[in-house]
Image: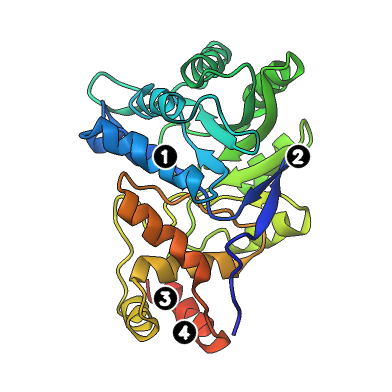
Amino acid sequence: MSSIDKSGTFTLGDRSVKRLGYGAMQLAGPGVFGPPRDHDAALAVLREAVVRGVNHIDTSDFYGPHVTNQIIREALAPYPDDLTIVTKIGARRGADGAWLPAFSPEDLTQAVHDNLRNLGLDVLDVVNLRIIFDVHEPTEGSIEEQVAVLAGLQQKGLVHHIGLSNATAAQIKEARRMVEIVCVQNQYNLAHRADDALIDELARDGIAYVPFFPLGGFNPLQSSTLSAVAARLGATPMQVALAWLLRRAPNILLIPGTSSVAHLRENLAAAELELSEDVVKELDGVAMAA
């Protein structure tokens, strides 16, 4: 049996963070647009996360927009010394809630200042460049200009560390020739495993990999194998999916999101779930069946 240590950590830049963090996307309204249905509940889930030891929160000023960062500030400022807040830039929201690229130097600079203002910070711990050329799927294309903008903001002391989101292997290599990249945030889960080789490469170099949609996102994971394993272990399918990710590689940091304190507790309990080698192999087959 292999036990996942709830206090297990990995390095994110010069910070040591718990491998189970929290993603703030669901704190905004439906479609990640507008205010939450229950403002007090949003505050409560953030405060509960920190009380339970979470010290890595993922957010973006284009969630809402501005909503989640303002709620994070209201709930948690002044921030605990060990809390690492990671944000994303590179997109904006249309008046109808559409997700639109915001990739110009002016857009990126403005986004950093918006994040600083709404979070109430003087410097951002980590800024992920979210790469959206015209679709949400990773798309090849040079990001030299955009990384140069972030490098300049880093030199000015507004950004501490730089990461990438929705990036291809070629884009990661291009960025790493210019600056230190401390994390990559791409889509990855039990059924969506296109980044298997990339995760192993980043692990060798000590770079964190942060799966977005670790539970399937807008289309939650559904697998008879996953459900059967969960039933045998007395856990939920989502807990098993999170536990599998923690087992997958030591550099994987998880940021499952929720607007519910009860669901938050359920997610964090996944760290205590034990998976045997046979169970891991059984779950590995989900990707082949997907």
Residue type at the position of mark 3: Val
Circle 1: element type: helix
Q: Which mark is residue 286?
A: 3
Residue type at the position of mark 1: Leu
Cα gap from disc 4 to disc 2, whole angstroms: 36 Å
Instruction: State the residue at coordinates (61%, 67%).
Output: 5
Instruction: State the residue at coordinates (29%, 55%).
Output: 219
Residue type at the position of mark 2: Asp
Cα gap from disc 3 to disc 1, whole angstroms: 32 Å
Q: Is residue 225 above or below residue 241?
A: below
- Of circles 3 and 2, the one toward us is 2
According to the picture, the residue beneath numbered tag 4 turns out to be: 282
Sequence-wise first label, 1 or 4 = 1
Cα gap from disc 4 to disc 3, whole angstroms: 8 Å
Cα gap from disc 1 to disc 4, whole angstroms: 34 Å
Looking at the picture, tell me which residue is in the foreground, 113 or 236: 236
Quarter of the image with the N terminus is bottom right
Q: Is residue 3 visible?
A: yes
